Structure formats: C-alpha cells, structure tokens
Amino acid sequence: MTEGPTGAEQTVPTCYRHAGREAHVLCQRCGRNICGDCMRQASVGFQCPECVAEGTRSVRQPRTPYGGRPAAGSPVTLTLIGLNVLVFVLVLVSGGRTGELIRQLWLAPRDLCWDTNAERTVCLEWAPGIADGAYWQLLTSAFTHVELWHIGFNVLAIYILGPQLERLLGAWRYLTLYLMSALAGSVTVYWLAPPNSLTLGASGAVFGLMAALLIVAVRVRGDVQGLLTLVAINVAITVLGSGFISWQGHLGGFVGGLLVSLALVYAPRRGRTLWQVAGVALVAVALVVGVLVRTPMLT
C-alpha cells in the first residue's frame, strides 16, 4: 500500500504469477500484470508465458507435402546409418561370420547345422532360423553386414536417398517406409530363397527407398529418367551378381517400398493420416500372413 497526495491509500500492482512482486506491465492478451521475469516479447508489447503457450498451440504447425512434421536435418537417416554401423562393429568384434552374434541376426529361413562331430554324422550345434521361432531375423538381418564393401555401399545409398524422403514424408512416415521395405524384402527371401540360405544387409530397404522416390517423382510429374536409370543399373547389378546378391531381398524391398509409398503419397488430403495408416496396415497384414503361411511349409 502507498499513500497518494490526498492521503488515500493506493494498491501496488503485483505479478499474477509471483505474489508480492511489483509489476506494472500488462499482458497484451489477457490484461494481467506481469513482472520482468514473466514478460515475453510479442508482435505488440509483451505477453505472459501462459498466453504465449496458448498462442503456440493455436497456430497451425507446418507439415511436409505428405502430412508429416518437418525436422531439422535428417535425424532418422543418420540414426539408421548409425545403427547399421554399430551392428557391423559388434559383429566384427564378436567373431565376424563365424561368431555367435551373427548367427542370431542374419536371416536363415530355417535352422542350420553349425557344427558336427568328426564323422559329420551328428549335428552338435544348430543355428536358429525363422521357421523355428527366430522371427526377429526378419528385421535384424536388414541391419547386419560383414564385408566392408557391403555396408559401405548400403550406407552411402541411405545417405543419398534418405534425406530427400525424410524431408518429403516427415520422420515417422519415412521410418515406416524404411522398416516396411526391409521387412518386405525379408519376407520375400523367406518365400523364394532356398531354405538353407543365409541373407543379410540393408539392400531391401535401399530398394524400397528408390521405389518411393520414383513414386514421388511420378506424383509431382517430375523427371523420372534419372531414377529409372538408377533402378535399371541396380537391377543389372543384382542380376549379374545373383550368385552372391539376394535378388529376392531386392525384389521384395522394391515392391514393399512401392506399396507403402503409394499409400503415403497418394492418400487424399481429407483424412490423409487415416488413409495412410490404413494403407500401411494392409501391407503389414499381408507380410504377417505371408510369414504365418510360409512357416509350416519349412517346419
């Protein structure tokens, strides 16, 4: 309280957020008194923290062309690259191709005899396969590499293709595309590769990214010549190297990426997220059914 010239008492305004702290500035939005610690610069005057937060919530957040939230940089792409490199290092330090870790991570359609007795008549140790319950291999195999050239090629491809799609789709949609492409490649290997084969690498996911960029280019009526050339070159490499390259994984990854990107890119604007989720869910259900149908055939 203060006393004015006429002797009347006057009340000193205080901050509504800090009791007892003198405050002579009014929030331009709600009109309440705020102290220096609570003042937030606005387009006109100052606002209190609550009004600033309310205004932020009411402002429509920016979206990517296909409904995602834009992110600074390429966090998902860099994380995926980091995971591939981390698994590569762990595989090497655990014994490489003959180590225990890789037996758990690569894709084996069904269990394989890992060690036999001297006469090779009795299997002493088995390596797990998908048909025998190692379903995690459908995904872990897509992050597993042994040779330096293999991980180098795949990581370079992810680094080149990934950021473009991450900017267009947003982080979560891009991550969904990557993982679904990888799984589609693995399920195709599960069906079409010999039961005693071993498959690893991120190539299925890379082919899915190429398919997605092709769909985006067609959607915006861009020049697809360069992308078609890139796909043709990789198909030729796959065919020529079919003796040691998994054409099944490449084919499945490309088709999976094609279907998922169609759902993401061609979803109508009205109710877009719901359409996208439904489209991706249909692909996921088809992959699950494919695994469930194939497993009894191998067991």
Image (spheres, rainbow, N blue to C red):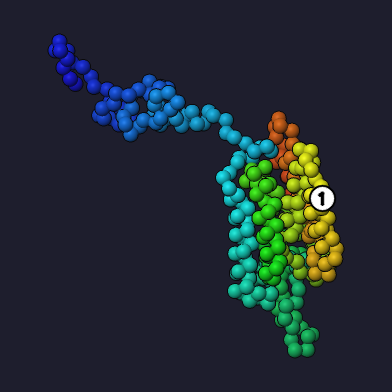
Identify which residue, 81 or 32, lies in the foreground.
81
> Is 217 drawn above or below residue 179 in the view shown?
above
- The picture quadrant where one finds residue 155 is bottom right
In the current view of this chain or complex, which residue is farthest to the top?
6
Residue 25, position in %: x, y? 32, 24
In the figure, is residue 39 to the left or right of 116? left
**Camera sees residue 158:** yes
Residue 7, position in %: x, y? 14, 12
**Camera sees residue 183:** no
- The picture quadrant where one finds residue 184 is bottom right
Q: Residue at x 61, y 40 (%)?
A: 69
Identify which residue, 131 or 156, lies in the foreground.
156
The quarter of the image holding the C terminus is bottom right
Residue receiving disc 1: 228
Q: Please tell me whether mark 1 sits on a helix, a strand or a loop.
A: helix
In the current view of this chain or complex, which residue is farthest to the bottom?
118
Q: Residue at x 74, y 83 (%)?
A: 116
Which residue type does callout 1 highlight? Leu
The quarter of the image holding the N terminus is top left
Q: Residue at x 61, y 74 (%)?
A: 94
Residue 132, position in %: x, y? 74, 66
Q: Residue at x 60, y 64 (%)?
A: 86
The local crowd at label 1, few if under 14, some if 14 to 19, many if 20 or more residues have their Cα within 10 Å, is: some
In the figure, is residue 233 to the left or right of 205? right
Residue 51, position in %: x, y? 43, 27
In the figure, is residue 55 to the left or right of 235? left
> Is 88 drawn above or below residue 80 in the view shown?
below
